[in-house]
Image (tube, rainbow, N blue to C red):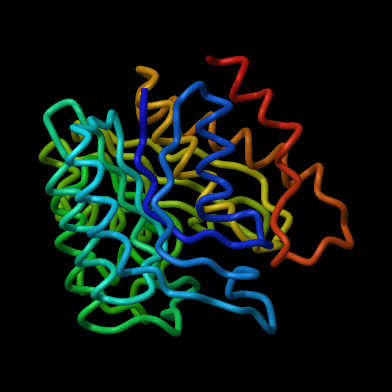
Amino acid sequence: MKVAAINDLSGFGKCSLAADMTVLAAMEIQCCPLPTAVLSAQTGYPSFYSRDLTGIIPEYLREWKKQSEIFDGIITGFMMSSSQAASSLEFIRTFKSENTKVLVDPVMGDDGRTYNNFSKELLETIREMVKEADIITPNLTELILLAGEDPDRIMQLKGDDLMEEIQSISILLGGGQGKTIAVTGIPLSEDVIGNFIMENGEHKVITAQSNKVHYSGTGDLFAAVFLGECLRGGSAFDAADLASRFILASVRDTAGDTPPRAGVEYEKNLKILMDRA
């Protein structure tokens, strides 16, 4: 199987394309990287060099179309701008077929705040990408942005009230019409986080322990494992369980003095993914 991965490549931070390529390879899936930018380190570092590669997306599209390439999956991550998202949307529309699973990770913000690259134009384009997707993996903030809801109101909800709101929004975004929704990193208590999964209208919350440290790249790892397991024939619930166990094991193996921006020590835990192959 082959997956086209549209994402940035960061030298440090264990995220984006580095996560896509290693995770999918461990799951015996060929990752075909399309770098949207190259960075000396991910944007959580205090200083970094970045080169925007938006212009190469149409060139890759043209060459891969000329080669008659067919992809079993397409995965997208961080978009630097609305124009980059628009080029990625064109790529999806060109290569998507009835046999292609498209996963869009709508990276726009976290903890109720948007990232520096956020704009109304980016939001609108990512909403169009979501319409084309079979799977979306937003965090709670991104789910709220996609639905155009009030983040101040929803971020204050707790317990059943919060989960009912997430379920309603997930249905609104297509979860009731066959789209798979995985809302990640939902705070359930001080030391427990949850992932709300909806597939074919059914939903389940998969929980995991939290050490209250927000590491770089865990969302990218989750998305890559999730898509890989779905391509291997697993359900969305199986995929979320596998991704959660993989990340939890990696967090536990990460040294206590590791800066969160450096990411988690996931390398030796790739065997968890290989055992399922």
Of the 4 image quadrants, the one containing the N terminus is top left
Q: Quadrant of residue 237?
A: top left
Q: Position of residue 83 (x, y in %)?
A: 24, 74
- Relative side of 241 to 160, left or right: right
Q: Residue at x 47, y 71 (%)?
A: 110
Q: Position of residue 256 (x, y in %)?
A: 87, 57
Q: Quadrant of residue 190?
A: bottom right
Q: How many marks?
A: 0
State the residue in front, 90 or 275: 90
Q: Is residue 274 above or below residue 54?
A: above
Q: Residue at x 49, y 75 (%)?
A: 51
| Residue at the image point whose x is 69% and y is 57% from the top | 263
Which one is nearer the viewer's eye here, 121 or 154? 121
Horizontally, residue 19 falls left or right of residue 120, namely right
Residue 224 to residue 165: above or below: above
In this rendered view, identify the residue nearer to me: 194 or 275. Answer: 275
Is residue 42 depicted above or below 176 in this figure? below
Residue 37 percent location from the top left of the image: 46, 67
Please give the name of the residue rendered at 58% of the width and 55% of the height, measured from the top-left corner: 15
Point out residue 221 in the picture as x, y percentages from the top left corner: 54, 45
From the viewer's perspective, is 169 left or right of 32?
A: left
